[in-house]
Image (cartoon, coloured by chain):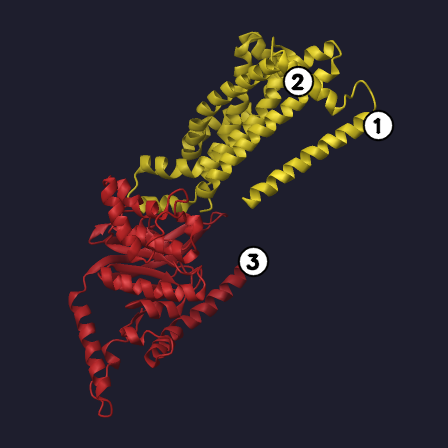
Chain colours: A yellow, B red
Amino acid sequence: MRNRIDVLTGYLIGFVSLFVIWHVASTWLLSSVLFPPPLRVFSRAIELAQDGSLGENVMVSLSRILSGFFFGTLIGVPIGLIIGSSPIARRILEPYTEFFRFIPPTALITVAVIWFGIGEGSKIFLIIYTTLFTVILNTSAGVAAVAPNKIRAAQSLGANRLQLFCFIALPATVPYILTGMRLAMGNSFVTIIAAELVAANSGLGKMIWDSRMYMLVDDIFVALVVLGLLGFGTDKLFRWAINLFAKRFSTAI
Amino acid sequence: MQCATLGPSNLVFWDSANNLKCKESFKRLCLYCFNREFNVTLVKLAGVSKVYKSLKGADYHAVKDFSLDIESGDFFCLLGTSGCGKTTVLNMIAGFEQATSGEIRISGNTIQGPGVDRGVVFQGDDSLCGWLTALGNIEFGLRMKGMARKERSEKARHYLSLVGLSGQENKYPSELSGGMKQRIQIARVLANEPQMLLMDEPFAALDAHTRAEMQTELINIWRATGKTVFFITHDIDEAIVLSTKIGVMHAGPGSKLKGLVEIDLLAEERDRTHDRFVDVYRHVHSLIRDEVAISLKRQSETMGSV
């Protein structure tokens, strides 16, 4: 309990000081229309929230991330498990993972738009692509890191190959899978904004792009702050989940 | 192989000064004869060699032409210096590694791989499942067999209390001390009812007090269950406290058995300050002393050549 209060006060101090630094910098140091103070940004955020456009853009971007992330994880975990547990599969699939992970999702935006149009299809494709390789790499690393003694012990206790996979390899890999998902989530934010900046009808990236056209600097800052908060929130959620499992699923024990 | 037996040769039948000692000696003789009478070879290693390929591609003989019989009901300690290949021997009996040549049989059958007839207790706690509770870990083997939930839980609880961990069933390994985790490993293996226990320096990572306590508990469990135990250690004290037989290994590489010592100490004599304990200690130590020196010399040589 005491720990939780410490953490919360820490966050409070952190955010308040960020607010103060921003305020001081924008009012006295860099007083300019191009750098709005926090209070103006917040009041603009309230206006945008009230007319519904902010909420809509957030929901659009978030749902793109979540659906792409969901399918990317769903495809990535089994592939990672197979690569990690079978040397033959690894030799066959490694060229793919090693090749594609060096082609960043942002490089594929134009291709995605040509293939899937500027609607949801291209965005979800890009997020799946972003998620897939991070999750595959982490999952396969997790399988490879399972302590050999765990496998030996289970074999001596009568586990067959399928049981070894389901009851040892899979649970022992959970922390790695979660870490992969966490990293993928961070990358997904990068991808989605880039994709929406380039070609989209809605979303936070589109909001930033449109605001630039009309010199609505306040609106750009609203989108940036919201992005920061969304990222912070989802990452917290993942860290909480990882900590919850890490106690039990740690590979060391 | 030099065979040194501290068996009947040093039994004293007649001692005019001390009648009690005479009785004790008789007890010891009975114990010895009983063991002789009913001993059946459970594990037989005949001319076993294990060759590893080193990183440079050269052959490394961990053990060479190694022969050993473990009899049913024995508490057999394999004693050796570090790097002498004792873990290799255990891994081959466990079926984790295959012998390059020679034969390993259990109850007459050639060992093909790991099996439920041989339960293994590891030195480190990384063999436990961190995501399972103490009870869940002990149940693991029974679950693999497909035993019903209620039945396996009852059985696991029995073994949990046998290793003195009642009340800890819902704790996760990370919440338990090193000694407790080794107890869980032992209970997990016993719950599976193997023919024999293979223990690879299970107490080496524990502090001295916990280790002594665990040794006492292990002897009690061994007496209560009558399992055959194959125990690896580099600790002479530990070997004498626990075992009925000690096999002393040569220093590696290409190691084999140097000597076999039968330990016929009574329970009350398995005390580090007891005269008979000290006698046995001297004898075992004389066997291993030179090997330690050789092993250290070889280690420093390889360090020098690298």
- Callout 1, which amino acid? Trp
Identified by mark 3, the residue type is Ser
Query: Which chain is home to disc 2?
Result: A
Mark 1 and mark 3 on one chain? no
Looking at the image, which residue is at 17% across and 73% down?
B33
> Disc 3 designates what residue?
B305
Q: Which residue is denoted by mark 1 in the rendering?
A: A28
The disc placed on residue A46 is: 2
Whole-angstrom CA distance, mark 1 to mark 3, is 69 Å
Compute the Cα span from label 2 to label 3.
Answer: 73 Å
- Residue B179 spot, x, y in % from top left: 40, 58
Horizontally, residue A123 falls left or right of residue A226, namely left
Q: Quadrant of the N terminus of chain B?
A: bottom left
Q: Secondary structure at mark 1?
A: helix
- Same chain? Circles 2 and 3: no
Select label 1 or label 3 by which is in front.
Answer: 1
Q: Quadrant of the C terminus of chain B?
A: bottom right
- Element carrying mark 2: helix
Q: Residue furthest bottom?
A: B17
Q: Is residue A157 visible?
A: no
Where residue B212 sits in the image (x, y, percent)? 39, 67
Quadrant of residue B40 in the image? bottom left
Q: CA distance from mark 1 to mark 2?
A: 24 Å
Of the residues tagged 1 and 2, which is closer to the observer? Answer: 2
Q: Badge 1, how many Cα within 10 Å: few under 14, some, many 20+?
A: few
Q: Quadrant of residue B78?
A: bottom left
- Where residue A238 appears, as percent x and y from the top left, is 52, 32
Please report whichever mark, 1 or 2, sits nearer to the chain's N-terminal start.
1
Q: Nearer the viewer, mark 2 or mark 3?
A: 2
Apparent side of residue B126 relative to residue B75 in the rendered image (left or right): right
